[in-house]
Image: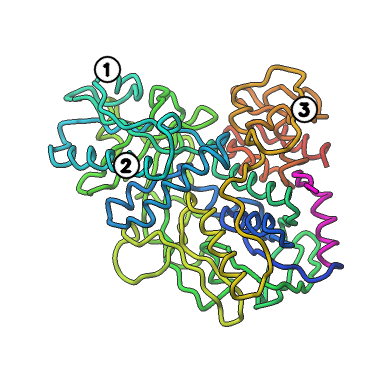
Amino acid sequence: MTASTALNAARRAADLAAVADGPPVDVVVIGGGITGAGIALDAATRGLSVVLVEKHDLAFGTSRWSSKLVHGGLRYLATGNVGIARRSAVERGILMTRNAPHLVRAMPQLVPLLPEMNTASRALVRFGFAAGDGLRKLAGTPASTLPRSRRVDARKAIALAPTVRRDGLDGALLAYDGQLIDDARLVVAVARTAAQHGARILTRVAASEAGRDSVTLTDTLTGESMLVKARAVVNATGVWAGEVDDSLTLRPSRGTHLVFDAAAFGNPTAALTVPIPGELNRFVFAMPEQLGRVYLGLTDEDAPGPIPDVPEPTPDEITFLLDTVNTALDTALRPEDVRGSYAGLRPLIDTGAGRTADVSREHAVTESPSGALSVIGGKLTEYRYMAEDVMDRAMRTRGLAAGVCRTRNLPLVGAPSNPVASLRSPVELPGSLVARFGAEAPNVIARATCGRPTDAVADGIDVTRAEFEYAVTHEGALTVEDILDRRTRIGLVAADRERAAAAAAEVLATAT
């Protein structure tokens, strides 16, 4: 029987009690990012009993700090890593056509042909885009989902990216990749789909003393601890993996993005893709995003030392991003145009010397001296493949009797073919709501009990009060920060956070 997809405080309490008093489980997954959520979903859909624990909130770490791109692997092809390039293209196609077509859309990427870009560089980009088309075809993704690349004239380039530099503009090269409406929303959708298949999703629960067949869990809200027996324990904590298994050596790299009002870029409809001077096959992207924003990224810098809960951009990274994008703009952006910023740490496998930009994005599944399995490295795009790899390993080495992986064709919550019953909305649904919730959007309004559910949470922010309530009643949000920083992205801009905080606090108080 299909379980409810709703995650909330009441379900958390019931699931915690069931874990404490119940029999051993098949799998405990430590980490509530995209990798951990993907593993929980894979295991649950194989018919295994699953507990996922996260010491903070879903998507608290690296999984909310990405570029919101589902890469097709073009960059990896250019560096000769054909395997990861092909897998990335395949996984992108699976997300766009089967798992989450409501959350991943085709994003135009525009490379302006400016005088600084010499003939060799232009030829390299054209070849890369053609290779990307080949990867798309090889992956079986139709052109109706992800259009073919092409060259466009200067007029079309300006229409797509209105602030692009006009002087010497010789048209542009246009290609397409996958773009998430939001990476944190993907994590929540995967976790809720795992819950739909019986997994217990427990946030604010810390793990310690992880071994081959047991782990100690501590409810950080009450301080109560329990020893849980499991046939397999999986460490999927990303850059914090070494805290669970001190035999692991990672080399985190920091990726920084800046947040702008879309108006600063002329309300673009394509991602302005700017070559980094002096680099081959490295770009910064100014990407149109939800809530009327443009995100500018990405850096790739070594981040040695202790791992912070919330990484911070450095002044040098901010300067680098502004200087690079300004080479392609008619009017230079200044530091005061930046409305917000964020940084995330990539959990790269330490391969020794060299730049982090050149370190492989492959993942690895290892076994710690204590017996816990760990998955390290990897990319967001490949989360489903990584989860399948981890669970195949667990079945071989832990004697788990279960079926084969089912996630390749499994629609997530919100996908049109997911069997969650969709209610009829009493009002016309805003396009922004549908973009964030897909086929589940009518439920958000129909199930709302708060006052003025269709009102915006603040002037100029296209998030409704009903979405705040749904975050609490169905998406596992337990705090105002969960609502503002992960279920929505309002918190990326401090001024918006201040204006929406009262509504979040009010809805949280009445919905729990």
Name the element at disc 2. helix
Left or right: residue 361 versus residue 31 is left
Q: Which residue matches tag 1? A: 155
Question: Is the Cβ of the residue at disc 2 closer than 8 Å to that at disc 3?
Answer: no
Using the image as rendered, state which of residue 432 and residue 305 is in the foreground. 432
Q: Position of residue 373 (x, y in %)?
A: 58, 72
Above/below status of 230 relative to 421: below
Q: Which residue matches tag 3? A: 423
Q: Tag on residue 134?
A: 2
| Mark with earlier residue (3, 1) | 1
Using the image as rendered, state which of residue 164 and residue 129 is in the foreground. 129
Query: Which dot, 2 or 3, sits closer to the camera?
Result: 2
Q: Residue at x 29, y 65 (%)?
A: 354
Q: Residue 434 sits in which quadrant? A: top right
In the image, residue 6 lies in the stretch drawn in magenta? yes
Q: Residue at x 83, y 42 (%)?
A: 512
Q: Position of residue 205 (x, y in %)?
A: 72, 62
Q: Residue furthest bottom?
A: 369
Three-letter amino acid code of the residue under disc 2: Gly
Using the image as rendered, state which of residue 417 and residue 298 is in the foreground. 417
| Mark with earlier residue (2, 3) | 2
- As measured in the structure, the alpha-carbon distance from the residue carrying label 2 to the one carrying label 1 is 28 Å
Three-letter amino acid code of the residue under disc 1: Arg
Name the element at disc 1. helix
Q: Position of residue 171 (x, y in %)?
A: 22, 24
Q: Tag on residue 237?
A: none
Instruction: Count neighbours of disc 2 (C-alpha within 10 A) and say few if under 14, some if 14 to 19, many if 20 or more.
Output: some
Q: Which residues are magenta?
A: 1-20
Q: Position of residue 22 (x, y in %)?
A: 85, 67
